[in-house]
């Protein structure tokens, strides 16, 4: 049994991805209880089903985020944390950043 | 009395001539000090930068306030004077960067930009002045830097960095600063830095936000380690589309200068495996720990597949400029020119003009008789706005004596969003709203300003 997981996730950069979520940058969500621990891969599916109604291709590609979005787990690059396989903990802070290119 | 007046006038004339002669002499003297800035249209070999044996008295005075810092000191200052830095892009990031590097006494500055100064650059590209409009940015930046510190050797390059010239150019410099404004150039600069073993101090800015990382530095990751694949072109927003507050690239360019100076002086950068993010709205900085160099990286990994520079515009699916792309989504009969639209107005043909730009742009300028419904609201089928559109169509139908498909013309800034809107409206026509004939006004309001009404503002 796993307790409910509370997550905050943010779109720090107004590179466009946050527009998909109706311009809301910060989401506080509680994931439903499930028998297995939640991982980031499942979180991305959950976000698509519950928060992202249109144009998912601007956020996901295959089972990961699309190129140009960097994922941070508790202020670290998700690559350091296991990427899609990272098991979410209660009160985790997940951030999606759009890479900026302007100058 | 008259005689005294006369002699005074003669004396004045004499003094005026003397002043003019002195001014001329001074100008010549100044000229002989500083050789004229020569704009480079191609990459040429440079003579090696020679190390100064010691600081002169003038150097000591000029740099005294930074010489006092134990972190820099005389040794650091001498290190700066023997370091060359290539600045790729003399825009919102490159201007403050070049300014602070020159002020601090960097040895040699390569200033590269293919573009010319425009009025819409001046709010953020602070080395250029009104009088430089139409001139090469590289030259304009170099002359401003020269005024600030004539002891810094400045080399302005008026050219587009390309797979053909990038390696030859970058090999001649110690540190590279990426101040560019587009994705293909960022991959090109990264690969050239990896292939020639140069540290890359990279920053970017958009709207109210900025990002900074030092790549390929002391065994740390490169740009491709972080971003192995380029973003889909339609997800990339540039400054001319998305806007940018001038001070934001200003802040990021200054941060870039700081990291360059730390590397050049020997102090070292702490951003080699770190992403610094700046949120201008919240006035907050955030530092993120990044992944290490990736063993499977295509350019800096163990078995690299990129061993020479490739075609980056093809790789990224976009052009190496920040100019807006021109979409072509519609057939010829779905589009009219701004001149066609002008004659529709002149004939007072009943129609509806729909402006699909965001409200913030409509506030800048609009045609007074247009109806504004932003593209995003059409795409989301915002009920109030759809209702409003239906009302206008009904009114139009009364005017056109029951035309079963009354004409609706769609306009935006440049004619990209308006094409998307035409596609959306065609889907809605006959179901969500009454049947309409929808056409795009090709080239948008900017074409209107250029060919029909020169008094209409351009932005």
Image (cartoon, coloured by chain):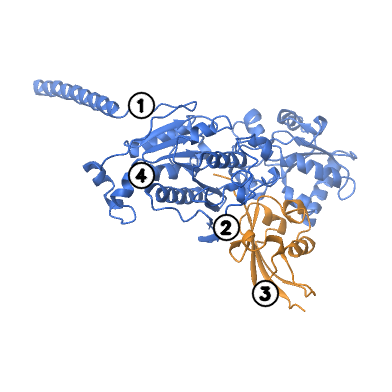
Chain colours: A orange, B blue
Disc with the residue nearer the chain's start (2 vs 4): 4
Regarding mark 1 in the picture, which secondary structure is present there?
Answer: loop
* Cα–Cα gap, marks 2 and 4: 28 Å
* Nearest to viewer (mark 3 / mark 1): 3
Q: Earlier in the sequence, mark 4 or mark 1?
A: 1
- Mark 1 vs mark 2: which is more N-terminal? 1
Residue B125 visible (yes or no): no
User: Looking at the rendered structure, which numbered label has been put on residue B192?
Assistant: none
Circle 1 residue: B36
Q: Residue at x 76, y 33 (%)?
A: B348
Residue beneath disc 4: B80
For marks 4 and 1, give the one nearer the viewer: 4
Q: Distance between the Cα atoms at labels 4 and 1? A: 24 Å
Residue on which disc 3 sits: A90
Are callouts 3 and 1 both on one chain? no
Query: Toward the viewer: B145 or B175?
Result: B175
x, y percent for residue B91: 50, 40
Q: Is residue B197 visible?
A: yes
Crowd tier of the residue under label 4, counting other residues whose Cα lies within 10 Å: few below 14, some 14–19, many 20 or above: many
Q: Position of residue B420 (x, y in %)?
A: 76, 42
Chain ID, mark 3: A
Viewer-nearest of discs 2 and 3: 2
Q: Position of residue A88 (x, y in %)?
A: 69, 69
Whether discs 4 and 3 lie on one chain: the answer is: no
The image shows residue B228, relative to residue A48, as above or below, that is above
Q: Is residue B35 above or below residue B228?
A: above
Q: Is residue B232 left or right of residue B434?
A: left
* Residue ID for mark 2: B290
How many labels were placed on the picture?
4
Q: Nearer the viewer, residue B306 or A26?
A: B306
């Amino acid at each position: 049994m796993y307790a409910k997981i509370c997550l905050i996730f943010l779109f720090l950069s107004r590179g466009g991805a946050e527009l998909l979520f109706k311009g809301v940058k910060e989401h506080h969500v509680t994931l439903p209880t499930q028998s297995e621990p939640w991982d980031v891969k499942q979180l991305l599916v959950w976000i698509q089903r519950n928060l992202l109604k249109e144009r998912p291709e601007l956020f996901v590609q295959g089972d990961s985020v699309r190129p140009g979005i960097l994922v941070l787990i508790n202020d670290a690059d998700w690559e350091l944390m296991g990427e899609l396989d990272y098991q979410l903990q209660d009160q985790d802070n997940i951030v999606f950043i759009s890479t900026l290119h302007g100058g | 009395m008259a005689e005294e007046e006369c002699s005074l006038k003669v004396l004045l004339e004499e003094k005026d001539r003397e002043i003019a002669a002195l001014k001329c002499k001074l100008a010549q003297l100044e000229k002989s000090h500083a050789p004229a800035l020569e704009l480079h249209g191609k990459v040429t070999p440079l003579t090696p930068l020679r190390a100064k044996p010691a600081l002169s008295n003038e150097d000591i005075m000029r740099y005294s306030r930074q010489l006092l810092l134990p972190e820099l000191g005389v040794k650091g200052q001498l290190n700066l004077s023997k370091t060359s830095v290539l600045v790729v892009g003399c825009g919102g990031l490159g201007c403050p960067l070049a300014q602070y590097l020159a002020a601090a006494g960097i040895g040699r500055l390569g200033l590269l930009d293919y573009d010319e100064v425009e009025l819409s650059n001046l709010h953020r590209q602070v080395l250029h002045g009104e009088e430089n409009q139409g001139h090469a940015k590289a030259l304009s930046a170099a002359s401003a830097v020269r005024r600030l510190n004539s002891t810094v050797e400045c080399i302005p390059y008026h050219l587009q960095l390309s797979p053909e010239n990038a390696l030859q150019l970058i090999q001649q410099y110690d540190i590279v600063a990426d101040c560019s404004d587009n994705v293909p150039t960022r991959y090109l600069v990264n690969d050239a830095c990896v292939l020639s073993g140069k540290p890359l101090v990279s920053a970017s800015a958009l709207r109210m936000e900025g990002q900074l990382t030092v790549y390929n530095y002391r065994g740390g990751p490169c740009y491709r380690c972080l971003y192995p694949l380029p973003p889909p072109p339609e997800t990339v927003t540039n400054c001319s589309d998305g806007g940018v507050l001038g001070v934001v690239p200003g802040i990021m360019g200054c941060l870039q200068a700081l990291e360059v100076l730390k590397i050049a002086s020997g102090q070292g950068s702490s951003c080699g495996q770190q992403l610094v993010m700046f949120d201008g709205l919240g006035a907050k900085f955030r530092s993120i720990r990044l992944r290490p160099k990736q063993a499977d990286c295509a350019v800096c990994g163990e078995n690299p597949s990129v061993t020479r520079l490739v075609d980056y515009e093809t790789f990224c699916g976009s052009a190496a400029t920040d100019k807006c792309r021109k979409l072509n989504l519609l057939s010829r009969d779905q589009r009219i020119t701004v001149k066609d639209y002008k004659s529709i107005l002149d004939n007072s043909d009943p129609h509806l003009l729909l402006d699909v730009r965001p409200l913030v742009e409509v506030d800048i300028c609009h045609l007074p008789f247009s109806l504004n419904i932003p593209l995003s609201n059409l795409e989301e089928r915002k009920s109030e706005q759809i209702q409003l559109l239906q009302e206008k169509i009904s009114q139009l139908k009364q005017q056109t004596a029951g035309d079963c498909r009354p004409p609706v013309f769609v306009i935006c800034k440049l004619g990209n969003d308006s094409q998307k809107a035409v596609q959306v409206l065609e889907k809605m026509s006959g179901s969500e709203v009454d049947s309409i004939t929808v056409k795009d006004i090709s080239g948008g309001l900017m074409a209107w300003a250029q060919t029909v009404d020169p008094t209409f503002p351009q932005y």
